[in-house]
Amino acid sequence: MQREQLETHPPQHPPLVVIAGLGGISAAGRSSGHQAFRRIVFDALNGDKQASTIKALQQLSGHSELSTEELLAHSLIREWDRKWDKLPWNPDAVPFHKAFKDEHGNQCWRLESKRLNVRSAAQLPLGFDPAKQYPSPGQAKHHPRGLQMAVYGASDALGSMGIKWEVICDHLSPDQIGVYASSAMGQLDSDGHGGMLQAPLVGKRTSSKQCPLGLAEMTADFINAYVLGNVGATGANVGACATFLYNLKAGTDDIRSGKRRLVMIGTSEAPLVPEIIEGYNAMTALATEEKLRQLDNLQDKEKPDYQKASRPFGNNVGFTLAESSQFVVLCDAQLALELGLNIYGAVGETFIHADGHKKSISGPGIGNYITMGKAMAEAQRWFGKEALTQGSFVQAHGSSTPQNRTTESEIYSRLAKAFEIKDWPITAVKAHLGHSLASASADQLFTTLGCWAEGLLPGITSTTEIADDVHSENLNYLLQHQQFDPQDKPIAFLNSKGFGGNNASSFIISPQKTHELLEQSTDSEQWNSYLNRNEVIRKASSEYDQQMSEGKIKPRYLFGENVLEPEDLKITGSEIWLKGWKESIKL
């Protein structure tokens, strides 16, 4: 009886939460305008789009004389990039204290240095310095790198919307806005907690900024204080490598409940400092020079192909650390229709589950079966069985470790069988972007939105074959970029597996399908009115993309501006009015 009801009743879904803006910075470049996605699939683009991508990378580098070959070689995963000496530390001479005892038996230390055996990472594109992007670069002087990147990423997401932030605020009350953003590691470079802990050892004074600016939730705090001026909801959910999806769920739930109408979601992670690298390396989690040589049967001192260091589901030896800052703006569908906002897609549901009892805190468990199974079942309830079995693809966690390739592939294979999926497309963007920890699933999201914009699924091009111990039944691992019709695949699954048993899976809906659903739920007059408004918005978004590639726009960073004091509030027993806002906060 239940099966008959499923087949005869049309699929149902709750109110849509749409994606109205996206922005950020990663090893692939700027996320808005799908520029970073285009860098990933560069070889599959036509000449005009390749030229646009190169122009965007040139602007980020600040060096217009760089050739196409140089810009491509100095983006995505690569050997430690020290051209123009942009790294604040030397991977060939990392200082450390070595313990020894003097002639009296007293414990002493002497300063030595060593060469890192991790030789590759997914650094931001060559020449890009987030501190220099501020309207006044001096204001960023003592900001941790992750927060500098957050200012850039959040501003980029706002710019991609094609409408002034102040215009949006005029349609909302202050408490209808939210920000959920964080990092997983906190800020561990010299201007954050890393510098605070190092100061006594290196003979420096602990600054007044290192302690507060090092906090993981400072990502959201910076956006509230210096980008948006937000007084609404704020939060910083942390779930290891699933952190972005934790924040995505919080924002989606807020909008669906009616508590919020617009929420900015994001993560910013800058883990490329020696101490973090050594920490993950001590777990044998990273792809080292020696391991890559052994993998590819190279002789001593032969240099591995570091651009192919990360090989999800292939023969691999560990993941590659990355830095990335990614943000999206979510809103309810009605607000998008009212303002004519861009619709880059919609968020379905996100599911989070732990692993239960574990042998190892860092090892995978069973929680990810539950999150993916729930996401698949919910997508089927929304859109029907055929949409799931024939119209979906997976952005896998794909960390590029031997343990992940077997355990995660088994999840997909078993669930594909259970849901009768015959040839499920599986891809993994860590092949190109590395592992950005908190931002890992955010990288998956901006890549997914790019897939639908360009009609291309990115391949795991860093490997030529799937490893023998990878489960492949009912699955189709994409090893090359593949063209597709976005109308045929309106559902994408994002999957994250975090240390400690932090599992999260989400399904995202294509912009084409979202438009179809919204048109069905509105009358023709309302829909045509939206399209007319959106035409202006799309033009403004395109102009923003072009101006960013020409270096004409700086991030939105408002230091000391529009600061509200107690006397700027009008308070009654039923509402609070804030100076500068048209709508009040209802009590």
Image (cartoon, rainbow, N blue to C red):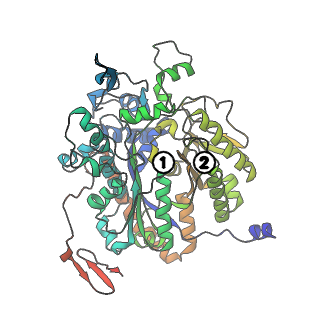
Residue 350, quarter of picture: bottom right
In this rendered view, identify the residue nearer to me: 2 or 408. Answer: 408
Q: Is residue 543 visible?
A: no
- Per the rendering, the mark at residue 84 is none
Side of 384 relative to 501 (left or right): right
Q: Residues within 10 Å of mark 2 (few under 14, many from 20)?
A: many
Side of 202 relative to 325 (left or right): left
Judged from this view, the residue extending furthest toward the bottom is 573
In this rendered view, identify the residue nearer to me: 567 or 176. Answer: 567
Judged from this view, the residue extending furthest toward the right is 1
In this rendered view, identify the residue nearer to me: 368 or 140. Answer: 368
The residue labelled by disc 1 is: 240
Give the secondary structure at mark 1: loop
Relative image position of residue 85 (x, y in whole percent): 27, 28
Residue sitting at 36 percent across and 73 percent down?
Answer: 175
Q: Residues within 10 Å of mark 1 (few under 14, many from 20)?
A: many
Q: Amino acid at mark 1?
A: Ala
Side of 570 relative to 220 (left or right): left
Residue sitting at 42 percent across and 26 percent down?
Answer: 119
Give the secondary structure at mark 2: strand
- Per the rendering, the mark at residue 394 is 2
Quadrant of the drawing holding the C terminus = bottom left
Is 482 situated above or below 344? Answer: above
Relative image position of residue 474 (x, y in whole percent): 72, 43
Relative image position of residue 92 (x, y in whole percent): 34, 22
Is 155 situated above or below 520? Answer: above
